[in-house]
Image (cartoon, rainbow, N blue to C red):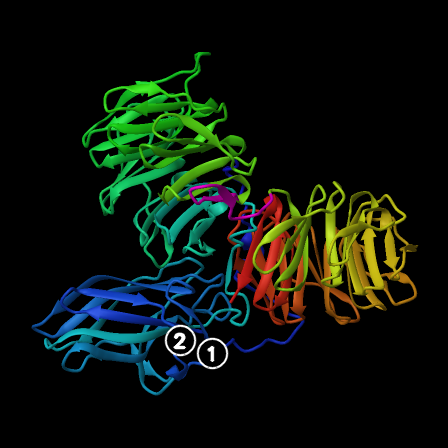
């Protein structure tokens, strides 16, 4: 099971040490306009409740459509606490915080200057039950936002990605004759680059990060968590990604409802979802946590390494004594005083509401302890524990006994609807089902390890596992919900947002049709390093051993390249004017009929190629090599660096970007190449692309995304801990990036 800690090495401080890195060769632009996010709130005076949600923006609201970017839980999250009403002084109040859910800092135009976050009243307060007039009692001021004299509260700080502000006390003057009132607020905040991608999320169906656990509140609310902080949600129709505030592997998920969900992970990670967004919670431990379960919102258990068991009482997580060093991998119970925990020393522990004690210990015939990975039951006298080599134990309320499982595969997860309808999943796609009498194998359709299983009914069951695998069982058969790969993906290209190709190692070519990703038969097992096309039916892919493949809209076919050198990149001005570059200074040109070699004048490996026309092409490579083609011959250009250059992209012939090792970022203005100021670090910038010279993206080994708006480079948060190698844009706000372990992430507004 691929749930592992990977070195983060997040050296974003090296990227200028700030959120925005200005290109000092260009003019300084004024701060971008602030952006607004519609949020609608309802107050219940008697119940002391203030709740905010995200309605559909009203055309009559006076907010320009290009500035209404979403609402509660999409780009920001407003939360209230300590809600109270004092009828004697007719004051209703609540402490309110703001959380930034975007990929950029809010409350600053440049990453340093504090302008703050203003939450202003765009409409209301309006009485919805009772009589009288409600007014905002203690605003920080009034200002013209969408109309004159709108009250606002100022959060005078910079909010980084996933950061929650300090709380502010909001007060309203509310007569005792009012029982409910409503209002609409918007969040107004400067950000370094407001008109670009605001969120990067996992591609829910094409990303290869493993799924470690699934849990469902209902048939229309299913959660899956996994590697690198991956969180997915299913609404009964589609899977969508949710942002995790911490990009560490998540290993367990459970909730008391669809709006009260816990996820646990490595390093003692505890996350909570309140129906709006996920936030990090204070953990009393730094050890890895593997599973979570509870009997209610105020009674939950999390288990992990070294005998760790934590308990949540509705307010705080605290450690409980277990008296064992066993790594606990699974937990389940019928109530807060009847809980079972299992782990890697073959021990089953039971909690009676007061004390944890060992209830059973099991070993294999070779004397090694059974590694129990999961436990579930239909009642306290009908409990199942599953483990390695197909081990299944059953508890009848008195004794634990072995059940034949019909498999020798390691089993990692177990769940059932009743004691006579139980599913266990495991290695190599193993699924076994118990009908109350015997366990029998079911066909999963995958060889990927399945780690977690949960359902709402016996004919609505989900299983998740390695390589982003998600399967669904409808009572008859299992079908795949996702199609991903764990193979590194090195490049992407598309003719539109519903026609995207991604290429990678061992002949991998994947295609996205706007709905799903599918593997295409490439006809090679060689590394495929680059892809480009002139249309959906004229696509070229190049790679190891001189590989050139061409796609005609139906199938991929071999083209003779005339070389055995690794071809690292391909680009063309048209379908009959295509260039490929590679090792040993190889440059090939395709004229619509055949590939021929062109003299490069270098033996350095060439790694990237791009141009503005067939007579204005740039190739880059090892040792700071930059070559330019004028339609007749290739000639060298001075780069000013010895670092390897790994990718090149051009908005025009006088606006070209090249990136490479050691944080190298160069710009060409039509006359000379100059370095862009990013600092110094042993970090590769692997890919550069864009939709225009004022909309450029860079990815690499810094675990983020750099964006250039024509004035400054800004670091955007990426949801994945993996290295991203390349990407493609259909617009400035519809972007895809691909990388190691089959990573696929999407940027959107």
In contact (CB < 8 Å): disc 2 and disc 1: yes
On screen, residue 335 above or below 650: above
Tell me, yes or no, whether the highlighted magenta stretch contains residue 470: yes
Residue 449: give x, y in percent of width and height: 52, 35
Residue under label 2, please give it.
57
Residue at 51% x, 69% y is 192
On screen, residue 740 above or below 220: above
Is disc 2 placed on a helix, strand or loop? loop
Indicate left or right for 433 with 418 as reference.
right
Tell me, yes or no, whether the highlighted magenta stretch contains residue 672: no
Q: CA distance from mark 2 to mark 1?
A: 8 Å
| Residue located farthest toward the front when viewing the structure as drawn | 476
On screen, residue 312 above or below 277: above
Residue under label 1, please give it.
65
Residue at 47% x, 76% y is 67
Is disc 1 placed on a helix, strand or loop? loop
Residue 558: give x, y in percent of width and height: 82, 49
Q: Which residues are magenta?
A: 469-485
């Amino acid at each position: 099971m691929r749930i592992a800690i990977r070195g983060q090495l997040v050296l974003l401080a090296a990227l200028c040490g700030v959120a925005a890195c200005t290109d000092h060769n260009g003019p300084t632009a004024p701060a971008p306009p602030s952006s607004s996010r519609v949020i609608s709130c309802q107050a219940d005076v008697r119940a002391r409740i203030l709740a905010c949600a995200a309605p559909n923006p009203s055309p009559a609201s006076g907010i320009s459509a290009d500035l209404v970017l979403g609402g509660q839980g999409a780009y920001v999250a407003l939360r209230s606490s300590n809600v109270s009403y004092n009828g004697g002084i007719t004051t209703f109040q609540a402490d309110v915080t703001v959380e930034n859910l975007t990929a950029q800092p809010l409350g600053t135009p440049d990453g340093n200057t504090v302008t703050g976050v203003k939450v202003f009243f765009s409409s209301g307060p309006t009485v919805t039950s009772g009589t009288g007039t409600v007014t905002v009692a203690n605003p920080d001021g009034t200002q013209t936002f969408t109309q004159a004299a709108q009250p606002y509260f100022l959060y005078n700080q910079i909010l980084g990605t996933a950061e929650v502000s300090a709380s502010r006390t909001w007060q309203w003057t509310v007569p005792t004759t009012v029982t409910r009132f409503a209002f609409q607020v918007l969040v107004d905040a400067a950000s370094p680059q407001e008109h670009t991608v605001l969120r990067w999320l996992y591609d829910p169906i094409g990303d290869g990060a493993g799924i470690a656990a699934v849990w469902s509140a209902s048939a229309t609310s299913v959660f899956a968590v996994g590697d690198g902080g991956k969180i997915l949600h299913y609404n009964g129709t589609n899977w969508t990604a949710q942002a995790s505030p911490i990009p560490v592997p998540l290993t367990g998920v459970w909730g008391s409802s669809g709006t009260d969900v816990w996820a646990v992970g490595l390093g003692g990670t505890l996350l909570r979802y309140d129906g709006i967004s996920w936030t990090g919670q204070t953990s009393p431990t730094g050890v890895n946590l593997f599973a979570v379960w509870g009997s209610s919102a105020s009674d939950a258990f999390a288990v992990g390494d070294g005998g760790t068991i934590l308990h949540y009482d509705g307010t705080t997580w605290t450690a409980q004594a277990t008296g064992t060093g066993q790594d606990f991998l699974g937990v389940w119970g019928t109530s807060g005083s009847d809980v079972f925990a299992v782990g890697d020393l073959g021990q089953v522990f039971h909690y009676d509401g007061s004390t944890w004690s060992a209830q059973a210990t099991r070993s294999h015939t070779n004397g090694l302890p059974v590694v129990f990975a999961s436990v579930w039951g239909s009642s306290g006298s009908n409990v199942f524990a599953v483990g390695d080599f197909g081990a299944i134990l059953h508890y009848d309320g008195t004794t634990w006994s072995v059940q034949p499982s019909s498999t020798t595969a390691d089993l990692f997860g177990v769940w059932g609807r009743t004691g006579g309808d139980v599913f266990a999943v495991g290695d190599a796609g193993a699924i076994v089902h118990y009908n109350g009498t015997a366990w029998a194998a079911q066909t999963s359709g995958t060889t990927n390890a399945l780690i977690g299983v949960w359902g709402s009914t016996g004919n609505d069951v989900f299983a998740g596992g390695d390589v982003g695998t998600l399967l669904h069982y409808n009572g008859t058969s299992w079908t795949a919900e996702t199609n991903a790969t764990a193979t590194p993906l090195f490049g992407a290209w598309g003719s539109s947002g519903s026609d995207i190709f991604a290429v990678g190692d061992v002949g991998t070519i994947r295609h996205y049709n706007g709905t799903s990703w599918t593997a295409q038969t490439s006809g090679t097992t060689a590394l495929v390093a680059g892809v480009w096309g002139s249309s959906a039916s004229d696509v070229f892919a190049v790679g190891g051993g001189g590989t050139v493949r061409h796609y005609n809209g139906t199938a991929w076919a071999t083209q003779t390249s005339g070389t055995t050198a690794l071809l690292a990149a391909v680009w063309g001005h048209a379908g009959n004017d295509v260039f490929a570059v590679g090792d040993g200074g190889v440059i090939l040109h395709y004229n619509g009929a055949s590939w021929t070699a062109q003299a490069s004048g270098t033996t350095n490996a060439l790694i990237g190629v791009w141009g503005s026309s067939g007579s204005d092409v740039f190739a880059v490579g090892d040792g700071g090599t930059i070559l330019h083609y004028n339609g007749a011959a290739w000639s060298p250009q001075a780069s000013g660096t010895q670092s390897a250059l790994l990718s090149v992209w051009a908005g025009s012939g006088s606006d070209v970007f090249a990136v490479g090792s050691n944080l190298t970022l160069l710009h060409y203005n039509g006359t000379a190449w100059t370095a862009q100021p990013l600092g110094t670090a042993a970090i590769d910038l692997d890919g550069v692309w864009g939709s225009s010279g004022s909309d450029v993206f860079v990815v690499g080994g810094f675990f983020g995304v750099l964006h250039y708006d024509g004035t400054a480079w800004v670091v955007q948060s990426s949801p994945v801990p993996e290295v991203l190698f390349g990407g493609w844009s259909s617009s400035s706000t519809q972007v895809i990036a691909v990388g190691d372990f089959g990573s696929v992430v999407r940027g959107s507004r």
